[in-house]
Image (spheres, helix red, strand yellow):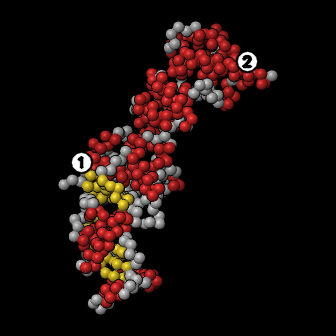
Amino acid sequence: MTLRLRFAPSPTGFLHVGGARTALFNWLLARKEGGVFALRIEDTDQERSSEEMVEAILAGLSWLGLDWDEGPFFQSLGIDRHRADVAALLERGAAYRDFTTPDELVRLRVDHPTRGLRFPREAAEALRPGEAEEKAAAGEPHAVRFRIPDGETVWEDRVHGKTRFRNADIEDLVLLRTDGTPTYNLAVASDDAEMRINLVIRGDDHISNTPKQILIYEALGHPVPGFAHVPMILGTDGKRLSKRHGATAIGEYAGQGILPEAMVNFLALLGWSPGTDEEVLTRDELVARFSLDRILKKSSVFDTKKLEWLNGQHLARKSPAELAPLLVESLPPGERERTEAWIESEPERFARLVRLLQPRSRSLTELAEQSRAYVLDPPQYDPEAEADFWLPDLEGATARLFALQEKLGEIETWEGAALERALRTLAEERGEGAAKLIHPLRVAVTGRAVSPGIFEVLMVLGRDRAMARIGTALDRLESLRNRRS
Ligand code: GLU
């Protein structure tokens, strides 16, 4: 039998971490088992749902690469079927009309907590045969409730094992509200049956809904799907993950330079384990390894540091060609074209730059930011770098850069060892440490106080650009000196 799974978000908010993980687990299993992954938008709460959120959820899933095979289906379009199902349940006596007023119910619940649970049913049974239909035909406001049968409801949860509820503890839930709108539990059971879903993977905040839905499937004569309830995600403080813990919407991470494959890897490890110590797993590896029996029973902790670490790991595994378009996208719009042109005209230099910066970047944003020092000509001089390494001794910095200009200008082959030899010889000739030369040189060729090793930097820039930058820096030092005198 083909495995049929679904993700059923409510478009009342963005795609958040918990929802994305539920979607991912469904998707991974569908891909692993050759099953179907369907998408259903649960938009029956018209007031809180919005088109914008639907778009945001679809965009979030697409960014993560979780493609769906069927849908999106919109729950609100199934309302006629939901009502027909309720009519069928009334017909079979599995549901009844409830004319109790809300005030009456509240009073009963407070005065008789257990009787309150069953009161609507008692009141309905007190009516003479046919009376409920007459009242309904006369337009008397009422809800339709499910008649919870006696006994207990048990299922073999694929995560938690045998799970049972005493039916006596379940209220006769409303199926159709007084305004004729279907409720969540009815709509979900009706839709899952219509979509022939045979395994429901969702967050364990839905566990208490499951016996109600099972009873509805049974009363409607539909096969009951399997269930796997995935434990909660907590913040590092052990509290349920919420906005207090920082970004919870998946879209925000895209904007922070997180790679979708890192997010997928991270989400997979939130509540699932490959059974080994491995942590860095590609999408394909996850598909191959995923299984329900490795879903952890206890809640997992959302640790942003781990996400950043995983992101760095995935970043480091990407080729320069894969990174080029992502890096360009992470730049301020005004710099994108120039950078693209640079990459196109000097692909080898770009590859070298990427390999230099990759191990030093935890996100695309960091990588893009660092790359600006190499691509933008002339570099932007960071005032703090100037203040640290130029301004305390403008004359000295100038003299050193002049000397470097001459020495480096004589180099025949522009490569690391020759550059290093030249600089160290110069330092010896001047009777000072190499650092005295390296610091002002670094500011001159990158505009920054911090960079990868200076010889690597000079190599990535290439002779022409490096020498031109030393020239630009000397002009700048001159204007700084003039300003001062
Ligand atoms: N729409 C529900 C939610 O977003 C999910 C319902 C389900 O998966 O059964 O929590």
Determine the CA span between mark 2 and mark 1: 71 Å
In this view, the residue in front, 220 or 72, is 72
Where residue 74 appears, as percent x and y from the top left, is: 36, 61
Between 323 and 443, the residue placed more toward the observer is 323
Point out the frontmost of discs 2 and 1: 1
Residue found farthest to the left: 1
Q: Quadrant of the C terminus?
A: top right
The residue drawn where x is 22% and y is 65% is 223
Residue at the (27%, 42%) spot, across then down: 288
What amino acid type should be assigned to the residue bearing mark 2? Glu
For disc 2, the marked residue is: 395
Q: Nearer the viewer, residue 432 or 337?
A: 337
Q: Earlier in the sequence, mark 2 or mark 1?
A: 1
Tell me the quarter of the picture where residue 176 sits: bottom left
Q: Residue furthest right?
A: 485
Horizontal side of 163 relative to 414 (left or right) equals: left
The residue that appears at 40% across and 78% down in the rendered structure is 178
Q: Can you tell me whether the CB of the residue at mark 2 lies under 8 Å from the nearest atom of ligand 1?
A: no
In this figure, which residue is indicated by the disc labeled 1? 34
Q: Secondary structure at mark 2?
A: helix
